[in-house]
Image: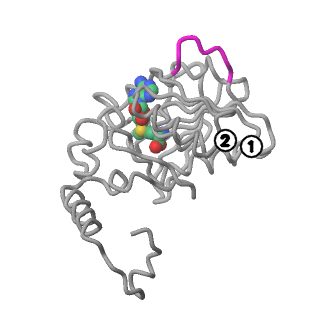
Amino acid sequence: MNVERHNLYIGQLHISKETKYKFFYLIARRANRIPLAYLLKKIYFYGLEFHISKGVFIPRPETESIIVCATQLIKDKSKKVNILDICTGCGVLAICLAKVFPFSKVIATDISKKAVNIARKNVFSHKLQSRVKVLGADIVPKNLCKKFSLIVSNPPYLTADEIEQADEEVKKEPICSLYGGENGMRVIDKILQMAPDFLERDGFLIMEVSPSQIQYFRELKNTKLSLISIYNDICGTERFVVLHKV
Ligand SMILES: C[S@@+](CC[C@H](N)C(=O)[O-])C[C@H]1O[C@@H](n2cnc3c(N)ncnc32)[C@H](O)[C@@H]1O
């Protein structure tokens, strides 16, 4: 109805038939477990508003910790950092990092065309076209020859069983944003393989993973990367790994 919520209680509002119809249509869809974000077509992340649409992963509040973690690793916000966001989805990490580091240049990649389109729309809404480029790619484009001080990623990391046990709403999200192969590590492994080639000598890779994958990082056998810290999510569960080049 385009009014503030309090007007619904205090005003003598005339609710048109059309509004009632739209309202009950949305309620019916929500009753079918369609996520609210897909109905409202917008979400909030790190205090900013973003477009979202069916077919694109809905950002979760815990992922905001990647931004906090980045600001702890790179204290000087006026630094001209090059940032790469792999698996950007609707672009929240790329856009928030570009805002937090106002002199940064950001490249964001995603394999899904729908995600790339929505991420570009969000970059445009936040007027960041000159500093944030969104590219369609499997991990990174083949011709990318750039080094980054910071690589971030929230890749798909669930197993088939974990998806099976998830809420109905989660199952309405695109499978390629959730499923990380048999052990959940398919995309993570690809990122671990390519990251050393794209990281600056003192650069960082921050990645969100499943709590069950943290042990893998503790015992990481990668000659080019080493684990420097593990961060908890807002529920106190270990969920973020920070790695750097050996
Ligand atoms: C869990 S979502 C994260 C989206 C966003 N970073 C966020 O936190 O809201 C994972 C994203 O990875 C993308 N993706 C899956 N496989 C990929 C690949 N091989 N290369 C690039 N992107 C991939 C999916 O399309 C999806 O948008």
Magenta stretch: give its range: 140-147
Task: Answer above or below: position of 170 versus 114.
Answer: below
Q: Nearer the viewer, residue 105 or 79?
A: 105
| Main secondary structure along the magenta-highlighted residues | loop
Q: Is residue 178 visible?
A: yes
Q: Nearer the viewer, residue 183 or 173?
A: 173
| Disc on res. 217 | none
Residue 157 image position (x, y, % from top left)? 37, 36
Q: Is residue 188 visible?
A: no
Task: Answer above or below: position of 200 versus 234.
Answer: above
Residue 246 appears left or right of 208: right
Task: Answer above or below: position of 116 versus 3.
Answer: above
Residue 105 image position (x, y, % from top left)? 70, 32
Amino acid on which the number 2 mark rests in the picture: Ala
Amino acid on which the number 1 mark rests in the picture: Pro
Q: Secondary structure at mark 2?
A: helix
| Disc on res. 98 | 2
| Disc on res. 102 | 1
Q: Nearer the viewer, residue 135 or 78?
A: 135
Q: Secondary structure at mark 1?
A: loop
Residue 17 appears left or right of 212: left
Q: Nearer the viewer, residue 215 or 126?
A: 126
Identity of the residue drawn at 47% across and 46% down: 239
Residue 211 appears left or right of 88: left
| Colour scheme employed for the rendering of this structure | one colour
Indicate the quadrant where residue 54 lies: top left
Circles 1 and 2 in contact, beta carbons < 8 Å: yes
Q: Is mark 2 within 8 Å of ligand 1?
A: no
